[in-house]
Image: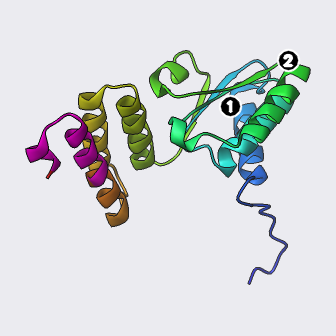
Amino acid sequence: AAGVPVINALTDLHHPCQALADMMTIRARLGGPAGLKVVYVGAGNNVAHSLMEAGALLGCEVIVSTPSTLRPNPSLTEAAASLAADHGGSVSVVEDPMAAVAGADVVAEQREVQCRLMIGLCRRDAGNNSEAVSSFKAGLHARQCTDREKLSLTYEIGVTYEAMGDVREAL
């Protein structure tokens, strides 16, 4: 147990302390977040929700890049977009991570292996199966890739090869 108060405020929908720390880092490094393009690459989870909200309140252009199957909560996204409009910013959700990060001032991401998985899923959803396989395979070699993540990436490689009609590789 800690000998001092600990504030986390983490829930399934929000992670405000992470967003606050991100915005403080942006302020320290870049002088302030207003007007900056802040891109989050990863699942539309509690971190994405809080980053959208914090960026909206501070006048950022916030872009969340995630596969269609992992989009952030629609009502939270709509509320953040409304907040952003009131504070001179914007909030959007896109699938293509490469397009999202083009011209970004700040890129926040999940761990590399998770990003490789996200990019692979986006590429596969867009019909770029060979690029998807390359991304999944790169994830297998990412630092700190757990056995469970390796299993997930291997599964996605097999599913993608199967979609390509390459049954031998799928096995």
Give amino acid for label 1: Arg
Q: Is residue 42 above or below residue 80?
A: below
Q: Residue 94 location in percent, x, y?
A: 57, 26
Q: Which mark is residue 29?
A: 1
**How far apart are the two marked residues, 2 and 1, measured between alpha carbons?**
21 Å
Q: Residue 11 location in percent, x, y?
A: 74, 61
Q: Residue 80 location in percent, x, y?
A: 80, 33
Q: Main secondary structure of the magenta part?
A: helix
Q: What secondary structure is marked by label 2? A: loop
Task: Determine the residue positioned at 53% across, 35% down.
Answer: 68
Q: Which residue is nearer to you in this view: 164 or 53?
A: 164
Q: Is residue 168 above or below residue 134?
A: below
How would you rate the neighbour count of disc 2 (Cα within 10 Å): few for under 14, some for 14-19, many for 20 or more? Answer: some
Give the quadrant of the N terminus.
bottom right
Q: Which residue is mark 2?
A: 88
Q: Is residue 86 left or right of residue 146?
A: right
Q: Which residues are magenta?
A: 155-170
Task: Determine the residue positioned at 80% across, 38% down.
Answer: 53
Q: Quadrant of residue 117?
A: top left
Q: Quadrant of residue 152?
A: bottom left
> Is residue 18 visible in the rendered structure shown here?
yes
Residue 80 lies in the magenta-colored region? no
Nearer-N-terminus badge (2/1): 1
Task: Determine the residue positioned at 8% across, 46% down.
Answer: 168
